[in-house]
Structures are given as C-alpha cells and as structure tokens.
Image (cartoon, rainbow, N blue to C red):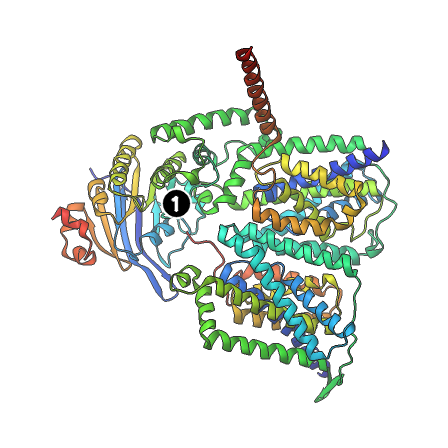
Amino acid sequence: MKYTATVLLLAGINMIAVSGCTVLTGYGGMFSLGQAGFMSIGAYFAACFHIYGHIPFLLAVLLGALVSTAAAVLIGFPVLKNKLTGDYFAVCMLGFGEAVRLISANFKPYIKGAMGLTGIPRKTTLTVVVVCTLVVLFLIRNYLKSHYGKNLIAIRQQEVAAEMMGMNIMSNKMWALAISGFTCGFAGALYAFYATTMYPTTYGSAKSTDLNAAVVFGGVNSLSGPMMAAIILAAMPEVLRAFAMWRLVIYGLLFVVIMLFRPEGLFGNKEIAGELKRLWRWIKRVWAWRTTGRKEAG
Amino acid sequence: METKPVIEVRNVTIQFGSLKANSDVSFSVRQGELFGLIGPNGAGKTTMFNAMTGSVTPTQGDILFDGKSVLKKRADEICKMGISRTYQNIRLFPQMTVEENVEIGLHAVPQYSRLAAFLGLPVVKRTERETKQRAREFLNRFGLLDKQDMKAGSLPYAMQRKLEIARALATSPKFLLLDEPAAGMNNDECNELVALLQQVHQDFHMTTLLIEHHMDLVASLCDKLCVLNLGKVLRQGTPSQVQKDPEVIQAYLGDRRRKRYE
Amino acid sequence: MAIFLQQAITGMSIGGIYALLAVGYALIYSIFDFTNFAFGAMMMMGSFACLFAVNSFGLPIWAAFAAAVLITIIISLATELVAYRPMRTKGSSRLTLMIAAMGVDIFIVNLMTLIFGGNIKQVNYAWPIRTIAIGPVNVGFVDILALVSCLVILAFLWLFLDKTIYGVAIRASALDTNTAGLMGINTNTISFLVFAISGLCAGIAGFFFGFKYAVYPAMGGISTKAFIASVIGGLGSLPGAVIGGLLLGVLETMISGYVSSTYRDLFSYAVLIIVLLLMPNGLFGKNSREKS
C-alpha cells in the first residue's frame, strides 16, 4: 500500500512538471534542454524560504515556483528577443541548466554548495500532491483549450503568418516559457520536501531528458498524451529496476524511432476525452449491428 | 471630391548591401480603391510588401497607413493598425482544419484575459461559440463550408488561396494586401478569383493593394496601377493608360497576354 | 609576461579543438540548416577508440589516431544514413530533426556510460617529449601538437572547399541547397561528404581532447562550447567558426587563469547570452531569421 502511494506521489509530481513542458514544447514547439534548472531553482528557494525564512510549507513552495518563473522570464528575454531558431533556444536553455548546477554547487551560504541541503522536513504527502496535481492540471487544461493554446499551435506551425494576423509572438512565447518555469519549479519544490535532501545534481540533464521524453512520447497538441506518458515514465523505474538503469538509453533510441515513424507522438493531436467518445460511439455501432444482425437471422 | 490617400509610400528606397531592391518608390492608394502593383519578376514588388508589413525596414523613405508610419513596427502591431495580408507561397496553418484557420484570424488578438483562460470562466466558452459561428459565416461566403473539417494543407491549391484570403479578412482589416493571389492558377480559376475579389471589394468596401503578374486579372480588376521595374516606378495610372505606355510594353516584352488588349 | 604567453598558447590549443568542432557544426548547419546535437557523442567515441587502441591493444600512436578518426567517421555516416537522411527525404520539420539528433546523443552517451562507467580514464601513452621551450615559456608538447594539427587540418579543409570540385559543390549547396540540386549536384553525395568531413573533425578533436584532459562518456558536453564558438563566429560560417573557436579558447583560458577556473564555463555561457543580445548573427554569420 505504501509502495503504491509512493508511485502515485512521484507520478503526480512528474505530471505537474510535464504539464508546463507540454505548453512549452508540445504546443509552443520550443524544445528546452534545461528544464531541470527550473526544478532546481524552485526546490532550493522553497527549501530556504521554509528553513531559514520560516515561511509555511505550501507558501514556500509557491514562492519557490515564482522565483523559477522569474528566472524563466529573465533567461527567455534575450534568447527569444531576436527570433532566432530553435537550436539557439535549446542550447541556451542547456547553458542555463548548467549554470544553475555550477552556481548551486559553489554557493556555500544557505544551500551548502556541493554538500547539499539536508534536513528538509518531509511535508509532501500524497494528499498534497493529488490536490496540487488536480489544481495545476485544471489551470493548464483550461489555458490550452482557450484561444491562447490554439494561438501557440499556430505560432509553431507558421510563425510569420501568425504574427501578421495580430499575435504578439514574444509575449506568447514568454508566457509559455514562464508557465513551464512555474510548473517545473513547483514540482521540484514539492519533491524536495519529500526527498528531504537537495543536491546540485538532483536535477541534472537526465531530468531534462525525462521531462522531454514524456512530451515527445505523449505527443504534440495534446495534454492527455504527455500526462499518461508522465505517469508511466514515473512509475516504470520504480517497478522495474532494470528499466531505471536503462531508461535513458531507451529514451534516446525511442526519440529517433518516434521521429522517424510517428513524429507527432504516440498520442499526438488526441485527448482522452475525445478518444473515449470515439470508443463509445464505436461500441454503440458494433452493438447496434450485432443486435439487428440477430433480429434478421432469427 | 478627392478621397484622402489611406496608404502612402513616400520615396522608399530599400537596399540590401549593394543590391537596391527598391529605389525612390512613391505611390498612394485612396480609400476604397483596388490598386495594383505590377511589374516583371525581380521588380521589387514583394520587397515593397514586406516593407509595408514590417519584415523589412526601408533604408530611406516612409510608409504611412491612415497617416501613421509603419516603420520600426512589429508585424502584429501593423496588423492592429488594420492591415492584413496574404503571401506568395501560401502560409496557411497546414495541419489545422479549414475552420480553425479562419478562427485563428478571429482570435489572434486575444479576446479575453489570460486569467479568464486559466480559470475557464464562462467568457471563454461564449467567445468560442461566437468565433465558431463567425468562422462558419466566412467559410460560407467563400464557398468553403463543406470543407470545414479538412486539413488546410490537403486542399487543392486554388482553394488554399481562397482560404488564405478568407482568413485575412477574418482579422477585420481596413486594408488588404494580396501577394500574387493568382499565382499558379489556370484561366478558369483566375476568373473565379477575379469575381471573388470584386465581390469582396464590394461587400466590405475594402481598400485593396494587389501584387500581380497576370495582366488580364489586373486590368479587369484594378482601378489604378503602379508599374515597377528594376526597383523603380515606371508608370502610374489607370489600367488602360498604363497598358498603352511604350516603356511598360518594353519592360514586359515577351508577355503574350498583353496582346489581348491592343 | 611569460605566464601570459603560456596561457595564450594553452588557450589557442583548446581553441584549436573548439575551432575544429565548430567547423564540424558549421559545415552541417550551413547546408542542412541543422545543428547536429549528436556531434559531441561522436567526438567521445573517437576518444574511446583511441583509448582502447593504446590501452587495450597497445597500438602505436598513429594507429590510435587513425582508429579515432575512422570510428568517428563511421558513426557520423551511420547516423546520417539511418536517421537524418530518411527524415529529410520525408520532409520532417527542423524540430523533428533536432529531437532525433538529441536522441542519438542521449542513446550513445548513456549506452557508453552503462557499459564503461562514468569515471574518467587516461590514455596510457607517454609522449616522448613532454614540454617544449619557446623563449621564456615551457609549453606542453601535446598543446602545441594539438594546435598545429588543428590548423593544418583546417588549412587542408579550406583548400579542399576552395579548390576541389567537391569542395565547390559543397559550398554551392551551402549557399542554396535547392538550386545546387537543380544544377545537377547530387545532394546524397554532398551529405555523405559533409558528414564524413564533420566526423573527421570530431575524431581529431576527440583524439587531442582525450590526451589534454581525459576520456569519459560525458566528455561530449564540450560540444556546447563549440556551439558557442560557432555562434560567436556566426552560425553557418566556416571562417567564423575557426575564429570563434580560437577566440573562445583563449578567452576561457585567460579567465580561468586570471579570475577563477570554477566559473570558466559560466563565463562561456555569459558570452553566449551577450552575443545573442548584441550581435545575434555573430561576426560573419548568415541571417538566421526567416524570410517572408
């Protein structure tokens, strides 16, 4: 029972982080190699606010997430300003993630540098995570279903025309980056209060890859896809020790395979609600066919 | 009574390094006019358009819409000034449906706040319904309603053009800029397009600026023409005036279509 | 003054490696508009090839060099033929190609980490000469060798691109891939050549880098510096890549020597941001914005 609770807790935290990355990459088409940096910033600041500033747990987590949001806006501005191609963005975010790691490994006051911050009280419970996940998913889902989400897709497909129709490209992209910064910071902070320790290497490039994997496998233009992928990818390493070891190798291979054969992702352009409706209609059709078939025969 | 010029190009020179794409070009378009910017390939027409929509900055000169300069403005700011355009190489959103393409035109400029979007307030659903309805009206007017759920990239070429024009009109512009709308069309499709543009011009009282090669299209459609050649203005005037000009004929030497009007 | 010279030469030697890598990047980017994110992984494989050649098989140093270059070229061509070319033929978007390249990188690096462990390894080869005295300074032999080799290779590359028919074809493709194809240049041959040359650059860089520092699976991370060097020089410009690489190497070593070595990498990222803010096209780059 406790084991299931742990898996659900980790899955929830992963869903929160991935939801922001879905907005940034799955909808906005901006591929970032440094999302782990936001998780780190959120975690460190939240822990410090709580331990040194005596700010209550949830408020500290929220504030930590806001700091990582600010970082996202700060780094986003120079990178997005000149409308450069996606390669620049990916590398700059990589640099950002590395910079966070470097600074946190060498900053002794408060966070104790490479020794890591220990003794963080365990405040994250399954209930907390479930509530937070539901709230975050509610907000993100609404945003993506609104015209802001559709405009992001338009920018990804045809930026030049999208801008000419009245969209402020910079503003839309900065918001997508800010949202991803917020959710990753929030998730990072929640996890810190679960793991009770926080090191500069807790969220490294492997974590950025984990997050991107969920979005790439889950698919573009979809929230359900990456969410399901987030659950599966969080649960698998817990269930299969071998998977935990080999997962990055498998992700690398799958990136290539999926891009070759199904670049829109496994669940791209689809949502659970839509697919369930289709399934229901199909079931009704089959049922109707079977009952009329029987009537005609007999 | 002379109507005021609503589009003014004043002594615009656009230079890329040592290449002068446009040299000291001046013309103006009046309210409600259907104006044609024509000339042989490489005359600098699309570059002029790009300068009008903010992708290129003129080296010298100014471009005014309704008396306000568009220089140093972003494309979306220019759009909010009331300008809409279509592109030579159609720039639809290929993986979106026909209906969604027009909807983007309707909500590219946000209709409600991000806060409302996050919270899923009733205004979101309401705006959604209205947008869908208005999009369908546009599609209906352009004869595309039966294709509303098809992916825009899978439409035949001529229909993609129509859709692009429909989408451009969805932003409720005051001025419409069309970059070679008849490119790649056969004679039947051209005639259909001419009828469509005349209809649009009538129904919307739309001031339209058109780049074209096809002489027939331009002659039967436009009120005024400006001929560019090698980046400079060659002649301006009504279609019949321009077509009789010997310099224009020489610039277009080899264009067999013009022979129909002699 | 002596220290300054020493730093400068050391800086130029790492700069030479950066320049080689940056040229490898620039070559592919200028033709395919594609950043090969798996480039660092290939360099790493070259290094490992050299490591095994010397440590496990006791081969002479020139054979180890050949092994490094050969392995890297093979892997470079393999990724092009299996992954990138089919995607380009299908018309995949830039984002798709980028993700695929990252997939290759993640796959190779993590596979090597799992098989050989993440620890750093040293190549057991004692160079006959350790240091050379140039005037008042003692400079490492490997540093000089690296710098000279890089410059020689770059000179050969420049000659190849400028004088041979294949080189001209490559440059034509870099200017306008579609027109080059229309003029009868076989894009498949071009891509083959370009990825082979790119692999060559990575292999040589890997050989020297392994000696200068160490061999370990994550060493490909240095390619980010090469990317930054490319940005400084102007993404897509080959002379820019060379100058950017040398510049970055010298600046980094100076900062490392005179300010702090811990924040050396941070300095490079700061340079990246500043260049992006002030001159996004770098010193010589082609315009990286979309046209209308």
Q: Check disc 1: other Cα within 10 Å, few if <14, some if 14-19, many if 20+.
A: some
Q: Is residue A260 above or below residue A121?
A: below
Q: Secondary structure at mark 1?
A: loop
Residue at 44% across / 61% down in the picture?
Answer: C177
Q: Residue furthest left?
A: B262
Q: Residue at horizontal 47%, vertical 75%? A: C162
Q: Nearer the viewer, residue C252 or C127?
A: C127
Residue reaching furthest bottom?
C135
From the viewer's perspective, tell me whether residue C187 is left or right of residue A41.
left
Which residue occupies 75% across, 85% down?
A: C129
The image quadrant that residue C49 belongs to is bottom right
Q: Residue at x 19, y 56 (%)?
A: B254
Q: Which of the chains bears the disc numbered 1? A: B
Percent coordinates x, y for residue B168 in the rendering: 38, 38
Q: Quadrant of residue B42?
A: bottom left
Question: Residue C115: percent from the left, percent from the top?
Answer: 77, 59
C27 left or right of C16 in image: left
Q: Is residue C77 visible?
A: yes
Type of amino acid under label 1:
Ile
- On screen, A60 above or below B129? below
| Along the viewing direction, whichever of A209 and B80 lies nearer the viewer | A209
Front residue (pair B114, C155):
C155
Quadrant holding the N terminus of chain C: bottom right
Q: Depth check: give the residue in front, C207 or C116.
A: C116
The answer, for residue C123, to whether it is visible in the render is: no
In screen coordinates, is A195 left or right of B216?
Answer: right
Rendered view: A239 above or below C184 = above
The residue labelled by disc 1 is B90
Q: Position of residue C127 (x, y in %)?
A: 75, 82
